[in-house]
Amino acid sequence: MIRKVMSRALPSEGKGVRVFYGEFINVDYVFGYIGRLIHGESGLQNIYILENEFWGRMLFINNNLQFTSRDEFVYHEALVHIPMQSVPDGKIKKVLICGGGDYGAAREVLKYSCVEEVIIVDIDPRVPKLVEEYFPELLPENPKDPRLHLITEDAYVLVDQYVKEGKTFDLIIVDSTDPDIGESENIQELSHALFGIDFHQKLLKICPEGVIVQQCGTPFTMKNILIGVHRIYRSVYPENQIYIYRANVPSFGSDNAYIMRCPFEYPQIPKGKVIINTLYYDFAVHGSSFVLPKFWRVELGL
C-alpha cells in the first residue's frame, strides 16, 4: 500500500486575499465567513468588502456587517416602504436620509413618483464611491435621477443647519450604523449623535407633521439599542404616534427592529398604490411587520 503524503500546490487565486473573517456578535458568539477580501481601508471608519460564495459581496464597517448583496433588499425595503405606505398616497414629497450612503434606502424611495426631493447626508465620502464600484445593484434605477442629492457631511450638523434655515421634510430616515452602546453607555461609533434626544428634538422641528423612522439593530443580540431609542422617542414624540416594526434579515441572524414616529392613523394598514418591483415588501408583509414577539414587548414595557 502506497500512502499519499505530499500534494500539489493550489493554483494561484485571483484578486483579493482569501480569509476567514470573524464578526463578533456578542459574548462568545461569532459569525464566521470565508471569502476573498477585495477591498480594505481605514479612515473615518474601517471599511472592508468581502466576496463570499453564499452571501455575494459583503460590506463591513468597523468590523460589523452592514449588508450583503444577497439580502440587502429585505432591510432596505422594510426601512422605506412601511413608512412610505403608512401615510395617505402622495403625501410624502421631500425625504431626508441621515446616513444611507450606500444608496439602498434612496433606491427604494425613488420608486415613488410623488417624491420630489431625496437628500442623502453621509459623513463618510468613501461609502458611496465603494458602492458605485462594488455594489451597483444598490443604486437607483436611474443613478442620475435629478431628485437625488448626495451631501458629505455629519447628519447632526446638517440637521442643525436645516433647523436654522426652516427647511422641512415629509419623511426622515435614520439609516446609520449601529451605535456601540455598552452597559456603560460608552458610544464610539460615528452614529453616536444620531441616537440622542437633542438630535430627535431637531428632527421634530424639520419634520413637524411627517414620519421619522430609525433602524435599531437586532434586539435579540443588542436589546439596549431598541430600548434606548424607544426611551428617546417617548421623550420627544407623542406616545400614540410611536410604532415599532420588524423584518427578518437573514444575514443579521435575527429580526431587525425599526422604530417610527407616524402622526397618521393606522400605519399598520398600507395606504398607497401597490409597489410591484420589490422582492420582500408587499401589503401582507406590511401589516404583519407590526406584530412583535412577546419578549420584545416585555422588555419595552408594552
Image: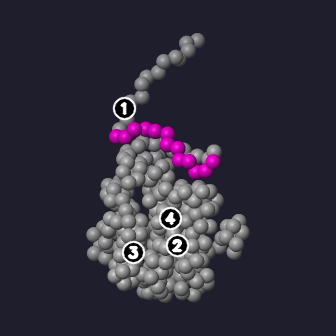
Residue 24 within the segment the image draws in magenta: yes
How many numbered tags mark residues here?
4
Q: Quadrant of residue 185?
A: bottom right
Residue 57 within the segment the image draws in magenta: no
Residue at x 55%, y 81% (from the top left corner): 237
Residue underneath mark 4? 75
**Pair 3/4: label in front:** 3
- Judging depth in this view, the residue of 144 and 228 nearest the camera is 228
**Pair 4/2: label in front:** 2
Judged by its main secondary structure, the magenta piece is strand
- Tag shown at residue 160: 3
Residue underneath mark 1? 12
Residue 137 picture location, percent across and down: 38, 61
Mark 3 or mark 2: whose residue is earlier in sequence: 3
Mark 3 or mark 4: whose residue is earlier in sequence: 4
Q: Say what amino acid the circle numbered 4 marks.
A: Tyr
**Left or right of 48: which side holds 299?**
right
Give the spatial CA distance, label 4 vs label 2. 25 Å
Residue underneath mark 2? 197
Q: Are marks 4 and 2 in contact (CB under 8 Å)?
A: no
Mark 4 or mark 2: whose residue is earlier in sequence: 4
Q: Which residues are magenta?
A: 15-27
Q: Say what amino acid the circle numbered 3 marks.
A: Asp
Position of 76 relative to 133 (above/below): below
